[in-house]
Amino acid sequence: MSFTLADIDHVGIRVTNRAIAQHFYEKLGFVFDPEEDSPRGQSIGLVNSAGARINLIYNGTGPPAHNV
């Protein structure tokens, strides 16, 4: 069976800290899209110059204290 990926609409990434994650992806060329801001849904959208979109879902919890 063959699989060809034509296009990706967006990728959702769960994060624990919105500001840190947003800053990281902005360094990679993504910019905040105010139309994709959803405080109720705890998510924001970022887009790059090629039109690739990511959604940062900022409701993640930190790792346990004993995590490596």
Image (spheres, rainbow, N blue to C red):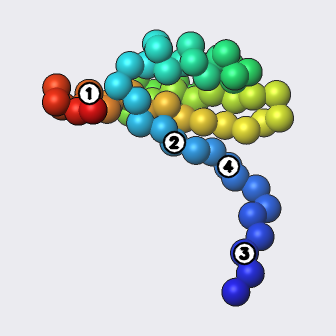
- Residue that label 1 marks: 62
Q: Residue at x 47, y 14 (%)?
A: 20
Where residue 12 is drawn, which disc sits there? 2
Whether residue 55 is visible to the viewer of this picture, yes or no, is: yes
Q: Callout 4, which amino acid? A: Asp
State the separation of the CA atoms marked 3 and 1.
Answer: 36 Å
Q: Which mark is residue 9?
A: 4
Instruction: Look at the numbered disc 4 and give the secondary structure of its residue.
Output: loop
* Mark closer to the chain start, 1 or 2: 2
Callouts 4 and 3 close, C-beta under 8 Å? no
Q: Residues within 10 Å of mark 3 (few under 14, many from 20)?
A: few
- How many labels were placed on the picture? 4
Residue 61 visible in the current orientation: no
Name the mark nearer the viewer: 1 or 4: 1
Q: Nearer the viewer, mark 1 or mark 2?
A: 1
Amino acid identity at mark 3: Phe
Q: Is residue 58 above or below residue 17?
A: below
Q: Which residue is mark 3?
A: 3
Q: CA distance from mark 1 to mark 2?
A: 18 Å
Relative to 55, residue 2 above or below: below
Which is more foreground, mark 4 or mark 3? 3
Rendered-image quadrant of the N terminus: bottom right
Residue 9 locus on image (x, y percent) = 67, 49
Crowd tier of the residue under label 4, counting other residues whose Cα lies within 10 Å: few below 14, some 14–19, many 20 or above: few
Q: Residues within 10 Å of mark 1 (few under 14, many from 20)?
A: few
Task: Identify which residue is drawn at 77% across, 70% down.
Answer: 4
